[in-house]
Amino acid sequence: MKAYKTNLDEAERGQLQRYFHATKARIGILTNGHVFQFFTDLDEVNKMDEKPFAEINLLNLRKAPLSQLKHVTKTKFNLDELLGIAEELKYIKGVKDEIRKELTAPSDWLVKEMAQRVHSARRIRAQILDSFRRIVAEAIQSYIADRINETLDKAIKTVEINEHDHQSNEQDTAEAKISNDIVTTQEEIEALYIVRAICANLIDSDRIMEKDTKNYCNITLDGEPRQSFLRLHFNFVRKKKIAIFDQDQPEVVSVKHPSDLYQYKERIRKALNLKLEPSRGSEQNNQDFTVETENSDDVVSAQQETEVKFVLQHIRGRESKGAAIGELLQVMPGKTRPQIQRMLNRLQASGRVHMKGKARGARWHLVNDSQSSNRIPTRRS
């Protein structure tokens, strides 16, 4: 054991080396009270190595290989495993030291290797090596700076999302005291139908479900919370927001109305595809629909307006195949065949859809007139 302020890298180790050689010990420890260096005999049997295979600084444990050195403790001491770990740590430390040297001052070997890879000359001469020495050094520093910036950007995005969720949760908690019941709003239902229409060509629409909470509503695959690919922040907030899970850090964006989801349809499809098997993913554009006010005969409730919009979008997604009533029953749980039949009859009477076939085998298609096919009955203001 050395004095507290002793630099162990420069300290005399002769006494420890003699003890190591004179005994059957395979592990030697040199310390000044706060830095511990661990030695073994990897280079030559029964002769302590010149360099330690591991080092622990009690004042800075971030870089300490604590999990690997657990075998030094009395309760978990295992010499065979410890010697294997020592050899691995020795080479890892050696490689790190060499990388550090190359990053600080690139060697002739590295400069020549890089020049051979990127320079167009068939033979790398001394003049090229001299010019490339500065280029390689600058490229290394630039790459390190880029990696640091990427890490910082990712950390900043994480903090922003966490802060947004924290603020939203605080506001939601305060307003949730008014009512403890989870209420799925009309806008959330409309958003669900819109997402089903956007993703109609990817999977069966009935696999896309909502999972509502007090603070937000998740749009999920098969109703599984871990399969959420879109989050709606429509409750207890003045400004509506959505979070699309199409990347490592979901981006929160503002929306004014559920129909704004169409602006992010490609990203929503991508987010869903990330939850599906790669072979199942495919993307196809869908045409958006506008809303116009019709005569009094076509005025419907807000719930019916949402359902009519979804029916038209589903038929559009089927393209030339059209849609049968049975298919609409599958994607609109809670609706009966007569209810859907009446809805289609009303749309046919207003010139938006037409029927091909007879009886239960009939399929419904959008009319060719784009102006007619894009109009959807809505409530009067």
Image (cartoon, rainbow, N blue to C red):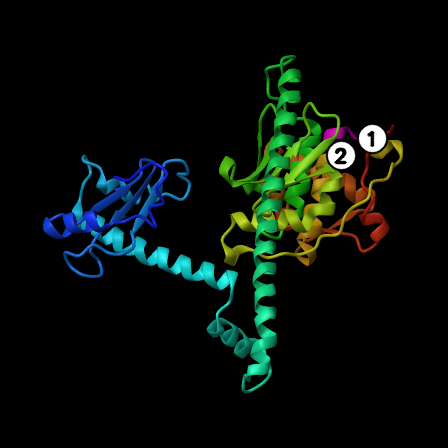
Crowding at mark 1 (Cα within 10 Å: few <14, some 14-19, many 20+)? some
Tell me which numbered mark, 1 or 2, is placed earlier along the sequence: 2
Q: Contact (CB < 8 A) between labels 1 and 2? A: yes
| For residue 236, above or below residue 350 | above
Q: Nearer the viewer, residue 104 or 237?
A: 104
From which residue to which does the magenta span run?
Answer: 299-304
Looking at the rendered structure, the kind of residue marked 2 is Glu
Q: Spot the residue most to the right.
A: 295
| For residue 340, above or below residue 281 | above
The kind of secondary structure element at disc 1 is loop
Q: Residue at x 60, y 36 (%)?
A: 159
Q: Which mark is residue 379?
A: 1
| Residue 199 visible in the shown view | no
Q: Which residue is mark 2?
A: 305
The kind of secondary structure element at disc 2 is helix
Position of residue 178 in the picture relative to residue 92 (left or right): right
Magenta-colored stretch includes residue 230:
no
Provide residue 118's location: percent of width, then percent of height.
Answer: 57, 76
Q: Nearer the viewer, residue 73 or 378?
A: 73
Q: Residue at x 30, y 55 (%)?
A: 90
Q: Residue at x 17, y 50 (%)?
A: 80
Position of residue 105 in the picture relative to residue 145 (left or right): left
Q: Nearer the viewer, residue 197 or 84?
A: 84
Q: Spot the residue most to the top.
A: 178
**Image quarter (top left, top right, bottom left or bottom right) of the C terminus:** top right
Quadrant in the rendering for residue 195 = top right
Magenta-colored stretch includes residue 302:
yes
Q: Which mark is residue 324?
A: none
How far apart, in angstroms, are the residues tagged by discs 1 and 2?
A: 7 Å
